[in-house]
Amino acid sequence: MKSTLATHYENVFKDCTIVGCGCDPGYLHPDMESILTSIVPEQLRSAPGSCSPLPPDLEGCVVLELGCGSGRNVFAAAQLVGPEGRVIGVDMRDDLLKGAKTHVRKQMKKLGFDKTVVDFIRGYPEDLLSLGVADNSVDVVVTNEIVNLAWNKRAVFSEIFRVLKPGGELCFTTVLADRRLPECLSDDVELQRAGLAGALYAEDFRRLLRDIGCHDYRHIKKQPVWFCEQMMLDRVGLACVTYRTIRTFKLPLEDICEDYGQVAVYKGTMPGFPKSFPLDDHHEFITGKPMLVCGNTGAMVAESRFGKHFTLTGDMSVHYGPFDCS
């Protein structure tokens, strides 16, 4: 007998390989356009099935992509992690994984790697343990709209934070609503395939992350989801739905920004970002310019893989009250 989990994803992806609202997550890595030209042409011609945001500074990292589709982003990430890194692609669609695996040897040869640094695994984002992804073993997790399509969102986030190393990053896209959508829409196949049926109310999303120990996340980009079909507009009603690119880290962060008098200076050493580095939509660090930061932002730039690119002055021994984010 098929599990409820398997049945859910079969319904979502039935008769199609690409689902989602169609918004563009954009490229977080400045060299992404040239990186894509290094992917074997046969792979580029296949349906991508995913367009996860790939953050910079991945050399030597272990990267996990959930919902990797035909593997385009996995191969792009392979170039970024280099021969000493590793990229794991997880998906539940056999046809796309089969196609991805046929290009592995040729892609590694084109990159000049002596060994294969990518693995494609069939499975579900709610259960990475059964796939052999160990605790504290991944530097960066990326995914595109899998969260809003997921059967059990809490399980997905719990698994992600289980496998992330301390200081590891989760960078993903999802769709959030400004209110709770009617429960009856969760089983609407058309809305599922549009990536909208599972859209969480933004405050419930915040509470979900809080409950698993993630108290601060940052928006990189927000854009409204426009409904082209009257049918979908009628079903969603007055709800405002936004497509978001988000990053957060496996760090002991506080639930509001607190002021400890810390100052961060970006060194300008991150590949592709010589003049400035945008951490999120309201923190752009100018090379060499001191910036007052809250305790959470200080941790994000000093206790993650970004730490080598920043100098953080001050500690958390003296508290000055809430941090004025304005």
Image: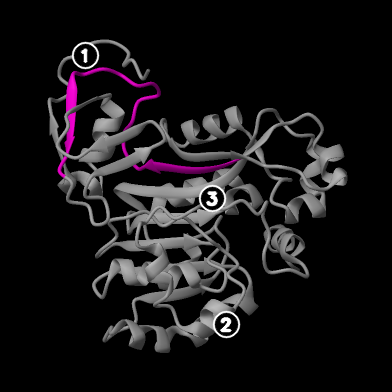
* On screen, residue 276 above or below 320: below
Q: Which mark is residue 156?
A: 3
Quadrant (top left/top right/bottom left/bottom right) for the N terminus: bottom right
> Between marks 3 and 1, how big is the CA–CA gap?
35 Å
Q: Quadrant of residue 316?
A: top left
The span shown in magenta is 243-267
> Does label 1 or label 2 sit earlier along the sequence?
2
Q: Amino acid at mark 3?
A: Val
Q: Are marks 3 and 2 in contact (CB under 8 Å)?
A: no
Q: Quadrant of the C terminus?
A: top left
On screen, residue 311 versus residue 40, left or right, reads left
Residue that numbered label 1 is attached to: 319
Residue designated by label 2: 99
- Badge 1 marks a residue whose secondary structure is loop
| Crowding near the residue tagged with mark 3, few <14, some 14–19, many ≥20 C-alpha atoms within 10 Å | many
Q: Nearer the viewer, mark 3 or mark 2?
A: 2
> Which residue is drawn at the image coordinates 27% and 71% (left, top)?
82
Q: Which one is nearer the viewer's eye here, 246 or 291?
A: 291
- Which amino acid type corresponds to the residue marked 1 in the rendered image? His
Residue at 33%, 31% in the rendered image: 253
Q: Position of residue 156 (x, y in %)?
A: 54, 50
Confirm whether the magenta stretch covers residue 266. Answer: yes
Residue at the outermost front position = 275
Marks 1 & 2, CB-CB < 8 Å contact: no
- 25 above or below 233? below
Is 67 left or right of 306, judged from the image as shown? right
Q: At numbered mark 2, what does the secondary structure look like: helix, strand or loop? A: helix
Q: Nearer the viewer, residue 3 or 167?
A: 167
Circle 3: element type = helix
